[in-house]
């Protein structure tokens, strides 16, 4: 129910043109990835195979939309759909040549994948029972819809240092993990007025953190101001150089809570003073369902047990919600279409995707619970299993993810099977959260689990799949992250888990929750168990330990690749930086003269191209790479003039013997790396002494006006170029830019204003716009 941005058609058209260029070999893979991933299209572990992540704010989708998604998947030969832990749906195993058509088809039904990946505002999560929970403060779903509509229409939502995650919870139970998101809102009512408790800086990823309390209460009108201020804070102070330290929480690690809060309130108060963006509450009303079904009466112990496990009362009298389990969140297009057809009998507000990768039906009249049960049995949903077995969360792992170490879905299946065969009273464990990730990243949300696992490489006489074990997370009033308690091989994971639960069940009556058991004595119990399982037999004695669950291949990292989650324009820097380092190393060992000469040419090219993106340059060929480097770095005195001759030789003569220039070229590559290491978060370089003694950058001594024509430059490069130009000016200077009609004029001025600068004027001249900016 979010509103699609006005620019989406142009975005899809532009993306389609890049797909064509890439498939024709005219566009570099790294540059294409920088555009592709923010559009929500990831490459899977198998080269040339992609998935499309569809934004579903609050986990909401109508039966009509779900049916169309199933049809689109079938039409474009996607044989698998997947529910994510951020309440979205992914279309797996997509051919890139089909991607543009898929995006267009999604747009026609009010859905989009834009912002599904990359350095963007991601899908906004909401408590799965918001709007129907008997004990909720109020329904937070409309806030997620409205905030999504606003954010995906703003350019700066797609040019962040790293991803930004937002969540809304409908009560103190915090079932959307608001305190574990970058920005979290928890519903509150004060003096009869709706509002939120607000948390900032939470994360479940590497070096996780519980968010800091930013506001104990703010009225609902403030949420746009707060979110805008957080985006601006992140954009200004986030680390754009190191994607491994780029999330919002790293600003806290670097500056400390007090300074981050000071910076936030400085931006927040400035926005409130100069901008008028109060939240206007909009409710979403759906036509009441009028099922044209004959109620089916079911009288069996299995039906009663299913209701006990999977059905819950709503606050609306006579209506019920139902959990529809999907193993690992996976479903094929045919079954998804059947679910859509069935739910269409119950209106538009009937489906939610959960953070535990299941479907939830809502607003089901009591007399139709038999119909739901019979339908689920008919299509093969495992309604007879204890709830615990159908709520195990596992990320996609090494099955399709390029970062995956272990086959987390295989481990999940093995665990479910072992638990199901055990003699444990699983219904006594129905509220426990088991989460598994295939690597140290937290796509499986393991540090928010009662018992969590994340993949690692174990080593004996050879590698074997293994997992770190974490336990004891607490969600709600006193939120805690799960703590590391040991390690276990993948093969032993199911037996190990059963042993833990057996110990817990013996002591369960002493503790209100598994988390409290862990804090009191469970950590010691689990640590002792990990010691029991620490001896791994050698390969010749037991080969089982050296195969991952669901694989007939000996465990290996050979297929592991580079993740795409943080893909952005600046990833091109890493490509050339890696090339420089690898080439320098190879040169040290190369004895063949011709091979060494080729490496020197490669080194000059990578050194020349590496930092061009920071100056807004987009060279179309190798000659332009060298010319732009000469102009923007050597002429600009950022790099010493002593390297000019080497660059010009490589540009003009492709067969020159560079052996006599080897030391100079090595020095050039080192100078470029030094310059990069001195670059700050605003893309400016320190004077590192690697240029001529006379090299200085003269700053204007009086206010000047600079003019730049950015017509024909697509988003977000027009924003990047504008930002770079402003960075070279001093406070009070003016920059006049020319922008095209459409997305550029709709987005760039607002994004520049968000950086703290002033828009003095913007006027239309013929078919373009003239925007005057004062640097602050």
Image: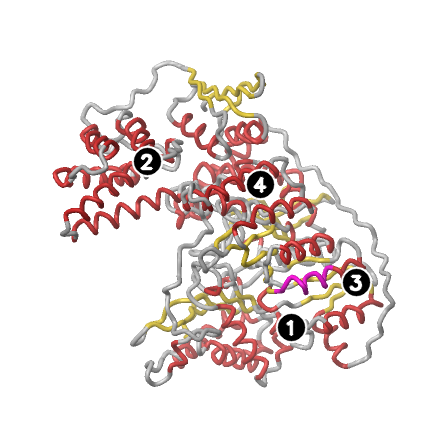
The range drawn in magenta is 331-340
Q: Position of residue 229 (x, y in %)?
A: 54, 37
Which secondary structure type mostly characterizes the magenta part of the structure?
helix
Circle 2 residue: 622
Residue at image position (56%, 79%) is 417
Can you say which quadrant of the picture contains the C terminus? top left
Label 4, label 3: how far apart the Cα atoms are: 37 Å
Residue 553 lies, with reference to residue 637, above or below; the image says below
Image depth: mark 2 or mark 1 in front: 2
- Disc with the residue nearer the chain's start (4 vs 2): 4
Image mark for residue 387: 1
Q: Compare marks 2 and 3 and give the one earlier in the sequence.
A: 3
Q: Which residue is mark 3?
A: 364
Q: CA distance from mark 3 to mark 1?
A: 20 Å
Q: Secondary structure at mark 2?
A: helix
Cβ–Cβ below 8 Å for labels 4 and 2?
no
Q: Could you tell me which secondary element the residue under label 3 belongs to?
A: strand
Q: Which residue is mark 4?
A: 12
Q: In whole angstroms, how far apart are the C-alphas of marks 2 and 1?
A: 59 Å
Q: CA distance from mark 4 to mark 2?
A: 28 Å
Distance from the alpha carbon under mark 4 to that under mark 1 = 41 Å
């Amino acid at each position: 129910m979010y509103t699609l941005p006005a620019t989406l058609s142009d975005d899809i058209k532009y993306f389609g043109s890049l797909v064509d260029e890439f498939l024709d070999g005219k566009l570099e893979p790294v540059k294409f990835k920088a555009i592709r991933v923010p559009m929500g299209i990831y490459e899977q572990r198998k080269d040339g195979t992609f998935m499309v992540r569809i934004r579903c704010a609050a986990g909401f989708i109508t039966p009509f939309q779900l049916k169309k998604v199933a049809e689109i998947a079938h039409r474009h030969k996607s044989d698998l759909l997947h529910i994510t832990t951020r309440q979205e749906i992914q279309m797996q195993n997509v051919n890139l040549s089909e991607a543009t058509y898929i995006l267009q088809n999604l747009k026609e039904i009010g859905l989009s994948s834009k912002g599904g990946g990359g350095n963007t505002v991601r899908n906004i999560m909401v408590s799965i029972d918001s709007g129907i929970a008997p004990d909720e403060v109020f329904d937070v779903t409309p806030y997620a819809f409205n905030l999504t509509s606003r954010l995906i229409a703003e350019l700066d939502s797609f040019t962040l240092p790293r991803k930004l995650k937002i969540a809304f919870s409908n009560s103190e139970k915090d079932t959307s993990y608001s305190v574990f998101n970058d920005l979290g809102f928890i519903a509150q009512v004060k003096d009869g007025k709706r509002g939120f408790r607000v948390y900032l800086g939470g994360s479940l990823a590497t070096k996780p953190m519980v968010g800091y309390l930013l506001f104990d209460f703010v009225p609902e009108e403030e949420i746009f101001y707060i979110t805008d201020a957080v985006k601006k804070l992140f954009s200004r102070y986030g680390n754009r150089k190191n994607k491994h330290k780029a999330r919002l929480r790293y600003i806290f690690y670097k500056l400390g809570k007090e300074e981050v809060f000071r910076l936030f309130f400085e931006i927040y108060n400035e926005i409130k003073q100069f901008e008028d963006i109060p939240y206007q509450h909009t409710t979403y009303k759906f036509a009441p369902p009028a099922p044209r079904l004959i109620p089916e009466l079911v009288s069996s112990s299995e039906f009663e047990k299913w209701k006990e496990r999977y059905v819950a009362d709503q606050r609306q009298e006579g209506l019920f919600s139902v959990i529809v389990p999907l193993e690992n969140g996976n479903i094929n297009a045919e079954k998804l279409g059947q679910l859509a057809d069935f739910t269409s009998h119950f209106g538009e507000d009937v489906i939610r995707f959960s953070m535990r990768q299941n479907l939830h039906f809502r607003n089901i009249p009591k007399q139709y619970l038999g119909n739901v049960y019979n339908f689920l049995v008919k299509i093969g949903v495992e309604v007879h299993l204890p709830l615990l077995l159908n709520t195990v969360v596992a990320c996609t792992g090494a099955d399709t993810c390029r970062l995956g170490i272990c086959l987390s879905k295989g481990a999940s299946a093995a665990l479910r099977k072992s638990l199901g065969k055990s003699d444990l009273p699983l219904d006594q464990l129905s509220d426990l959260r088991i989460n598994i990730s295939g690597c140290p990243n937290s796509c499986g949300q393991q540090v928010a689990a009662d018992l969590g696992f994340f993949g690692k490489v174990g080593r004996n006489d050879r590698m074997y799949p293994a997992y770190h074990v974490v336990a004891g997370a607490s969600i709600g009033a006193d939120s805690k992250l799960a703590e590391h308690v040991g390690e276990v091989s993948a093969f032993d994971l199911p037996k190990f888990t059963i042993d833990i639960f057996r110990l817990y069940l013996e002591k369960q009556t002493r503790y209100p929750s598994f988390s409290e058991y862990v804090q009191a004595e469970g950590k010691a119990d689990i640590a002792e168990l990990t010691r029991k399982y620490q001896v791994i037999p050698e390969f010749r004695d037991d080969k089982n330990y050296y195969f991952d669950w669901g694989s007939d291949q000996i465990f290996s990292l050979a297929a592991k690749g580079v993740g795409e989650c943080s893909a952005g324009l600046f990833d091109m820097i890493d490509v050339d930086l890696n090339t420089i380092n690898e080439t320098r190393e190879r040169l040290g060992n190369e004895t063949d003269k011709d091979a060494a000469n080729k490496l020197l040419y490669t080194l000059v090219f990578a050194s020349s191209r590496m930092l061009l993106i920071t100056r807004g340059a987009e060279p179309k060929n190798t000659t332009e790479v060298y010319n732009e480097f000469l102009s923007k770095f050597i002429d600009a005195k950022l790099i010493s003039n002593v390297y000019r001759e080497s660059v010009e030789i490589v540009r003009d003569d492709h067969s020159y013997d560079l052996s006599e220039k080897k030391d100079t070229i090595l020095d050039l590559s080192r100078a470029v790396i030094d310059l990069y290491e001195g670059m700050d978060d605003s893309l400016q370089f320190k004077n590192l002494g690697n240029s001529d003694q006379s090299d200085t950058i003269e700053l204007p001594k009086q206010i000047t006006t600079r003019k730049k024509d950015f017509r024909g430059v697509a988003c977000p490069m027009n924003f990047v170029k504008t930002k770079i130009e402003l960075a070279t000016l001093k406070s009070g200077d003016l920059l006049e830019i020319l922008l095209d009609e459409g997305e550029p004029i709709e987005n760039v001025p607002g994004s520049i204003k968000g950086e703290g600068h002033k828009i003095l004027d913007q006027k239309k001249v013929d078919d373009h716009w003239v925007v005057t900016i004062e640097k602050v």
